[in-house]
Image (tube, grey):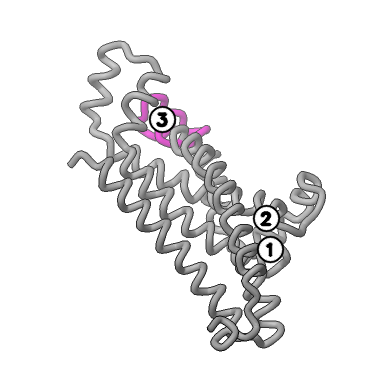
């Protein structure tokens, strides 16, 4: 049946491309989650009225975050080619896409983290401070747990963006489903390959969204 409806599709290529897309999304997602949390916390704590208000530090980080999240991803990949080649040793393959994926997604997620932290009840924060809670206690026992639904919702949106970014990276040699759709589908005029690659990307996105919604619902105490 596969050969009848998708005559040009090779299942081994599809599985390999899917694995590369999941690999890029997972590794970049973990790094983005960690960096985004750190940047978001710094932005929240140093903002006007924050616990450690610092206008200079906030302005510098805020500008960097705004700049990197505003650069179109395809342009960001090109801009980071020298850095990627120095760090990875090549500009081809799934690993070569990771620096651009992380740099492109972490600032985006950092803003979502900052927004999520601002939704934490100030009364809870003040109560913890009045009890002498240290910064580490405030972060890991109050801020992150209280904002966890927003953080999970934010990383869900970010992971979906990473899937899209990985597809764009595939067009310039990073591998994955984007590379399969472009090289085997578009360039060879094999519409069936492009269709299946697109449907596979959509399936990955739907699964990520479903899992994110389930986890967010369970964490939300409201």
Q: Quadrant of the C terminus?
A: top left
Q: Is residue 115 left or right of residue 203?
A: left
Question: Which residue is identified by label 2?
Answer: 97
Residue 202 visible to an observer of this rendering: yes
Residue 122 image point, x, y percent: 24, 30
Badge 1 element: loop
Residue at point 37%, 52% (across, down): 211
Residue appearing at x 39%, y 49% in the figure:
154
User: Please, what secondary structure does the residue beneath circle 2 have?
Assistant: helix
Task: Single out the mark in the foreground, 2 or 1.
Answer: 1
What's the distance in space between the residues labelled 2 and 1, CA to CA?
Answer: 9 Å
Task: Please state the extent of the stretch shown in magenta in the rendering.
Answer: 43-58
Task: Residue 125: give x, y in percent of width and height.
Answer: 27, 25
Which residue has dot 1 on it?
175
Against 182, is 16 above or below?
A: above
Q: Earlier in the sequence, mark 1 or mark 3?
A: 3
Whichever of callouts 2 and 1 sits on the residue coming sooner in the sequence is: 2
Determine the image quadrant of residue 79.
bottom right
- Residue 163 percent coordinates (x, y): 53, 60
Q: Nearer the viewer, residue 49 or 109?
A: 109
């Amino acid at each position: 049946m596969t050969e009848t409806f998708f005559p040009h599709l090779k299942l081994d290529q599809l599985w390999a491309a899917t694995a590369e897309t999941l690999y890029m999304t997972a590794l970049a997602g973990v790094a983005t989650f960690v960096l985004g949390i750190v940047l978001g916390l710094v932005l929240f704590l140093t903002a006007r009225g924050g616990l450690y208000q610092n206008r200079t530090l906030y302005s510098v980080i805020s500008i960097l975050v705004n700049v990197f999240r505003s650069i179109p991803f395809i342009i960001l990949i090109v801009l980071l080619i020298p850095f990627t080649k120095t760090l990875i040793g090549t500009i081809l393959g799934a690993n070569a896409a990771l620096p651009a994926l992380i740099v492109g997604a972490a600032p985006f997620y950092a803003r979502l983290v900052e927004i999520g932290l601002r939704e934490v009840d100030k009364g809870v924060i003040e109560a913890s401070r009045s009890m002498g809670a240290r910064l580490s206690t405030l972060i890991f026992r109050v801020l992150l747990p209280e904002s966890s639904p927003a953080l999970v919702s934010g990383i869900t949106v970010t992971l979906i963006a990473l899937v899209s970014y990985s597809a764009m990276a595939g067009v310039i040699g990073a591998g994955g489903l984007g590379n399969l759709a472009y090289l085997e589908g578009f360039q060879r005029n094999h519409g069936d390959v492009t269709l299946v690659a697109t449907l596979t990307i959509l399936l990955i996105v739907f699964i990520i969204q479903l899992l994110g919604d389930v986890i967010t619902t369970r964490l939300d105490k409201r």
